Amino acid sequence: MMIRNFILLAILLLTFSVSISLVPAQDLSSDDVNRMTEDRSAMENNATTKEDAPTTSASMQGIWKASLGEEEIIMAVNQSEESLFGRAKFEGENPWNGALAGSISQNAVSFSMAAMEGEALASIYISANLEEDTMRGFFIRSDSSGKASRGDFTATMISPDTSIYTPALVTIAPLPAVQTEQVTIEQKNDVPAIEENEKTALVPKRESRFQDVTDLAKGINPNIMPPMAPL
């Protein structure tokens, strides 16, 4: 009898200890599941918010004073959504005027310029980051003579109104000496028809050494001519 009671008591103690050890484990698993569910929902909400938020690019519209290494230029940039277009000029020694085109994505700017620098056609590529009214980046330049260079690019906006932009005054190079001489010769040889006619009228008409006998006979009286002897 005592053995049976001891066995029942041991079974009850074992059952009670197992039930105590399972309760906190079940509670901990439920908390973890709830926390994981909340974290997943928060991540999904953040992802949805980022996808729905519109990505707007900064504005680059305006006149900029830029430095291409040691050379300073002025750019008038117009912007239509992400497209950039406009003009540029250099007013130092050997001034030039050029055109630019490119694009902007958020704060990343990239555009190219083309210009006639003296007798060479130059192309300049610029990549920069836009921060409010300043830009910083690099440029790569190459021209039709085979020269190429790379350097730092910086720019500062000096006016948001591109309508006040004026191009640089570029002196047109004179014609080569050989071509100028040919033009002068052609102008000398090209005498107007009126002058030719006047010169022709001033030159006296030369008389022929041969005279027409019929003209001489008109002035002779036939009565004074001697009669011809009969044959």
Image (cartoon, rainbow, N blue to C red):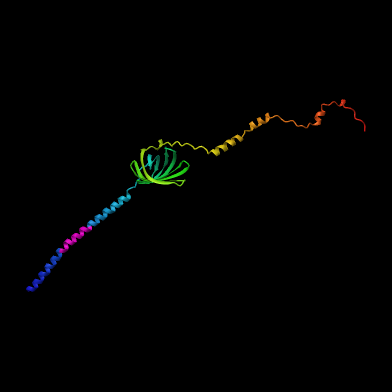
Is residue 21 in sight in this rendering? yes
In this image, 3 relative to 103: left or right?
left
Q: Residue at x 60, y 34 (%)?
A: 188
Q: Residue at x 47, y 43 (%)?
A: 120
Q: Residue at x 11, y 67 (%)?
A: 13
Q: Residue at x 66, y 30 (%)?
A: 199
Q: Is residue 25 magenta?
A: yes
The residue nearer to you, when weighing 192 against 184, is: 184
Give the image quarter of residue 200: top right
Which quadrant: the N terminus? bottom left
Which quadrant: the C terminus? top right
Q: Determine the residue located farthest toward the right in the rendered image.
A: 230
Residue 161 x %, y %: 38, 37
Compared with 93, 140 (above or below) is below
Compared with 21, 122 (above or below) is above
Q: Is residue 101 magenta?
A: no
In this image, 31 relative to 3: left or right?
right
The residue nearer to you, when weighing 87 against 217, is: 217
Highlighted magenta segment, given as a residue range: 21-33
Residue 47 x %, y %: 30, 52
Give the image quarter of residue 117: top left
Give the image quarter of residue 113: top left
